Image (tube, rainbow, N blue to C red):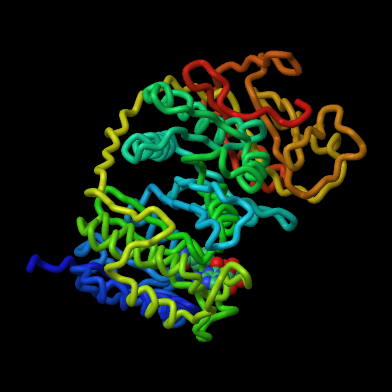
Amino acid sequence: MSEKTKIAIAHGDGIGPEIMEATLKILDAAGAKIEPIEIQIGEKVYQEGHTSGIKPEAWDILRQTKVFLKAPITTPQGGGYKSLNVTVRTTLGLFANVRPCFSLYPYVETKHPVLDIVIIRENEEDLYTGIEHQQTNDTVQCLKLISRPGSEKIIRYAFEYARAYGRKKVTAMVKDNIMKQTDGLFHDIFKQVAKEYPELESNSQIIDIGAANLADRPQNFDVVVTLNLYGDIISDIVAQIAGSVGMAGSSNIGEVVSMFEAIHGSAPDIAGKNVANPSGLLNAAVMMLVHIGQPDIAAKINNAWLLTIEEGIHTGDIFKPGVSRIKVGTKEFAEAVVGNLGHLPEKFKPVSFGKAKKITIPEYKRNIQKKELVGVDVFLDWPGTKPDELGNRLRALAGDLTLKIITNRGVKVFPEGQPETFLTDHWRCRFVHKEALIHHENPTYYPIDRRQIAELLLRLDEAGFDAVKTENLYYFDGKRSFSLGQGE
Ligand code: NAD
């Protein structure tokens, strides 16, 4: 008998322990050659004072096993606690979150008989870096970080995945009509990388209408690649319209470690009632078995599961009179799958898995761009209400720079603001070179040096202004690399 593969497992919170027990029971009955090692994560660990939700010793087990089957956990709301899911994904470099969603029509009710989509979600960046600050009495900020290597890696992964698994099309979802720098970078990289895969169709959609299209006409999509937040949202939408959010599994792939989990959360509303659908975690476990080189056992489980579904043996979330036959609990569903092990589905096409496809992403090569400092945005916490008053005071303090514009929540309020614009206590004041071509169709900026910024900040401080943050303005390779204010 070949050796068992050690895997880390966590039972999680809410419905986690029930669906993990059901999943492990099926894996065991199917003869999966695994040796689970339990690690402690989640609510209990948070309560013991570990703000990251994971015990320090668990990291060693994760590094050792390199494979993690994880039940959902409850993230405590509010300050002080970090999302464990995000911590594990980012700490271990699990850059690709792969979420296959498919409909099981007509055995699971759905409006979309043809739905077979793989959502590939960037897993380490975006608003999920969790860098948030309160800056003024009225305003808090969350930093959206998008990097070139991060974007390139996930986009290449999506195209490589499509190629490896015989998919035809890759769609990017972005919002670069608004976020021209962040989503714009992702979109630009997508267009460049797409050229290297001429056999694959590629297109992009703006996330708002894209999400609507996914919900309305999912048959038009194949592989979707997108940023972290959008991917989180659309994968729940697609899983739900396919039948239930309780059905979809996911893999979080890193270069060394990989984590497998359901896409749904800990569902505290149904915890402990033996009603949760274990299929999401089971499908994740199937992905894990393929990943660790046990594709035959993965297929055996998947086929037994498909047969159970087509027999109409359904948990409450997918139970529909007329379509389903027997309503079962978590345990009974698992028993039915166990009973079907070794049998093939009769209506669905039986699945078989080959060896896991190795997807390798070439190392990122940094292309050094020429960087020129051309100005600074100084963000002020100022309780006043008259932008002209602020503008005139700042002009007097600008020294060898010039105040170009003041915006409030991104909208121009000085010079020549509009009386209707709502004002908060958070003011973005843009200082640039004196000779910059401002109020111009094609604004042109000139280099300044960092000392000018430091001196400006000193003058502002001496005049009693509270500069809560500065953001330098750069040209990269001669191109303006910051957004203009609305109305600028
Ligand atoms: P949720 O996914 O837990 O539940 C949403 C709805 O779907 C609920 O009505 C729930 O009953 C139902 N549902 C979810 N899984 C189901 C299943 N397997 N079978 C039947 N019905 C199911 O989302 P939520 O309520 O927003 O979040 C609850 C907690 O889970 C939060 O603390 C959240 O932070 C956490 N969460 C964890 C993960 C994770 O561990 N990967 C992911 C998302 C949310």
Residue depicted at x 73% and y 14%: 441
Q: Quadrant of the N terminus?
A: bottom left
Which quadrant holds the C terminus?
top right
Who is closer to the viewer here, 436 or 239? Answer: 239
Q: Nearer the viewer, residue 53 or 246?
A: 246
Residue toward you, 147 or 220: 220
Residue at the image position 33 percent from the left and 76 percent from the top: 338
Which image quadrant for residue 306?
bottom left
Residue lying at the far left of the rendered structure: 1
On the image, the x and y values in percent for residue 324 come to 56, 71
Q: Is residue 380 above or below residue 269?
A: above
Residue at the bottom extreme of this rendering: 273
**Spot occupied by residue 35 in the image (x, y as percentages of width and height):** 20, 73
Image-quarter location of ligand 1:
bottom right
Res. 83 visible in picture: no
> Hey, which residue is sitting farthest front in the picture?
346
Judge whether 259 appears above or below 488 on screen: below
x 44%, y 76%: residue: 16
In the rendered view, would you say 49 is above or below 5? below
